Image: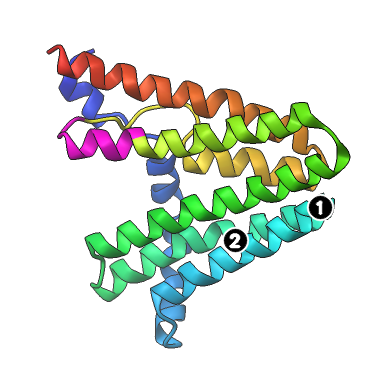
Amino acid sequence: MDTAAQEKKKSLTDYMRIWFKGILDPIATVLNRLGIAPNTMTILGLLLNVGAAFLLSQGQMFWGGVLVLIGGPFDALDGTMARLRGEASDFGAFVDSVTDRYSELFILGGLTFYFTQQGDWLSVMGCYAAAAGSVLVSYTKARADSLHFNANTGILTRVERYLVIAPLLLFNLPIIAIWIVAVLANVTALQRIWKVRRQARG
């Protein structure tokens, strides 16, 4: 597959933006009319995930999963609101991305605390591997972008990780969730490294 074809390939995140545009735009329009700022939605989403992390640390997997599930749409709404206001900016995208990383790390931190209290050290290592993979997925793309490479690839980006973690927490299956993320997030980082390597070699 040539470079041009690779550039045109859409990720699940891209497709979901298209699929849910008809839902997100009207909600974002209403929130804008109510005078709610996009940054407020970003902070609320972060706070929901902090609350989820606390519940997870106490072993409340279902209710923690509920907050994670509720917090997910905030990540999409803040950007949609900014776009409809004509206020989308590089700094706003930067803050949104950083907040996403904090949210994920809070959630995995809550699970790490819980498994530590249970003496489940294998799951603690799973949380560490999941956190490392999640950060590396983001870092490899950011570093590639800074060097003018395209690293938009991988099987477990932010949206996919959300779709793995939230439902499995609701079904009280946190161990399965963390190991799926631990393995596939690191695979995604390696996919991005390989893609950049191919571009660098021409």
Which quadrant of the figure has residue 2?
top left
Classify 10 Å Cα crowding around label 1: few (below 14), some (14-19), many (20 and above).
Answer: many
- Magenta includes 163? no
- The percent coordinates of residue 118 (x first, y second) are 87, 40
Quadrant where the C terminus sits is top left
* Rendered residue at 30%/29% (across/down): 9
The amino acid pointed to by label 1 is: Phe
Query: Which residue position is annotated with label 2?
Result: 71
* Closer-to-camera residue (74/16): 74
Label 2, residues with CA under 10 Å away: few <14, some 14-19, many ≥20: many
Image-quadrant location for residue 71: bottom right
| Residue at 36% in and 28% down | 153
Callout 2 amino acid: Gly
Look at the image and give the residue range highlighted in magenta.
140-149
Q: Is residue 146 magenta?
A: yes
Q: Residue at x 39, y 59 (%)?
A: 96
Q: Which residue is mark 1?
A: 62
Which quarter of the image is occupied by the N terminus? top left
Estimate the spatial distance between the alpha carbons at disc 1 and disc 2, rounded to whole Å: 14 Å
Give the total number of marks visible in the rendering: 2
Residue 126 visible: yes
